Image: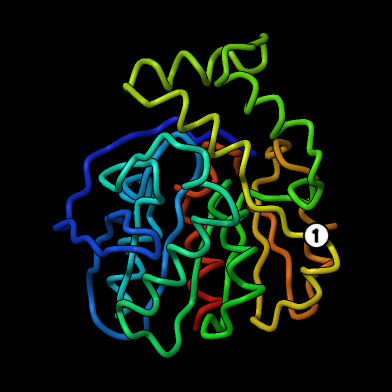
């Protein structure tokens, strides 16, 4: 998975709901109109979207924007016991949030690890009619993905040149290494066969210099009702660009 090295405070008022296992999940809810759910990446939280043009332009275009902090991140509860991250717990949290807000229909945008969580949600959640998988290629469909295992081990004390920077950054912002280890260890896996079950219309979008997570064209080819857009940018910059926002707004329109 790609690493998004940004942490910021949320501008909107944070709200909370109790998820399926009693953990409190934080989220913000801004705007009115058709709902768009934004799902953040790794070593960050929902506030990463404050650095994007996309959030502002969604609100300016009349959308309602829901942004959760996935469990273990931001203002959400941060349990350290392994079972609280097993069995697609983050996916269940998002489904519970949709239930809690009584949403009958919505769109969703994931970026980086957020796309991994969202892909699994799309298998089970038919209320999402349009979805954007950003900053992601095909590699997350492999249960033994070497990059996931690399970062899982890194946050368990086994670093190398590729992972040391991410570990140092996590330390600098006070992120809990055990939780980051558990998030990688129990990260949702959506197989290629499962991807074929997705009913939503899907946009796969990635930067032309983003080589972190495999081939986005291969990902697009596994999803029935999907299209691919490549825009200028690397993994840490693409989601903040105007071209990223333009492509998503055109897709949602």
Left-right relation of 180 to 163: left
Along the line of sight, the residue nearer the viewer: 196 or 186: 186
Q: Residue 16 appears at what percent x and percent y?
A: 22, 60
Asked if 223 appears above or below 128 in the picture, the reply is: above
Q: How is the image coloured?
A: rainbow
User: Residue at point 47% right, 47% down?
Assistant: 84
Left-right relation of 136 to 22: right
- Per the image, label 1 sits on a secondary structure element best described as loop
User: Residue at point 58% right, 84% down?
Assistant: 126
In the rendered image, which quarter contains the N terminus?
A: top right
Left-right relation of 178 to 79: right
Asked if 190 appears above or below 42 in the picture, the reply is: below
Q: Residue 85 appears at what percent x and percent y?
A: 51, 46
Q: Residue 238 appears at what percent x and percent y?
A: 54, 45
Q: Which residue is mark 1?
A: 191
Asked if 64 appears above or below 82 in the picture, the reply is: below
Q: Residue 142 appears at what percent x and percent y?
A: 82, 47
User: Residue at point 31% right, 56% down?
Assistant: 25
């Amino acid at each position: 998975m790609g690493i998004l090295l940004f942490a910021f405070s949320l501008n909107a008022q944070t709200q909370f709901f109790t998820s399926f296992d009693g953990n409190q999940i934080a989220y913000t809810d801004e705007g009115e109109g058709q709902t768009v759910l934004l799902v953040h990446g790794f070593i960050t939280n929902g506030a990463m979207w404050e650095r994007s043009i996309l959030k502002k332009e969604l609100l300016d275009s009349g959308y309602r924007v829901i942004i959760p902090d996935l469990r273990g991140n931001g203002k959400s509860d941060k349990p350290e016991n392994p079972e609280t991250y097993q069995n697609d717990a983050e996916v269940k949290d998002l489904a519970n949030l949709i239930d809690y807000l009584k949403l009958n229909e919505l769109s969703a945008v994931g970026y980086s690890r957020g796309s991994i969580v969202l892909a699994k949600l799309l298998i089970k959640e038919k209320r999402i009619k349009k979805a954007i998988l950003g900053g992601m290629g095909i590699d997350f469909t492999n249960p033994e993905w070497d990059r996931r295992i690399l970062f899982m081990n890194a946050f368990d004390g086994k670093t190398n040149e590729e992972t040391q920077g991410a570990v140092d950054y996590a330390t600098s912002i006070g992120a809990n290494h055990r939780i980051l280890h558990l998030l990688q260890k129990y990260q949702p896996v959506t197989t290629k066969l499962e991807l074929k079950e997705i009913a939503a219309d899907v946009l796969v979008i990635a930067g032309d210099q983003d080589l972190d997570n495999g081939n986005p064209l291969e990902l697009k080819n596994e999803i029935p009702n999907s299209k691919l857009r490549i825009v200028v940018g690397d993994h840490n910059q693409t989601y903040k660009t105007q071209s990223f926002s333009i492509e998503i707004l055109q897709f949602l329109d």
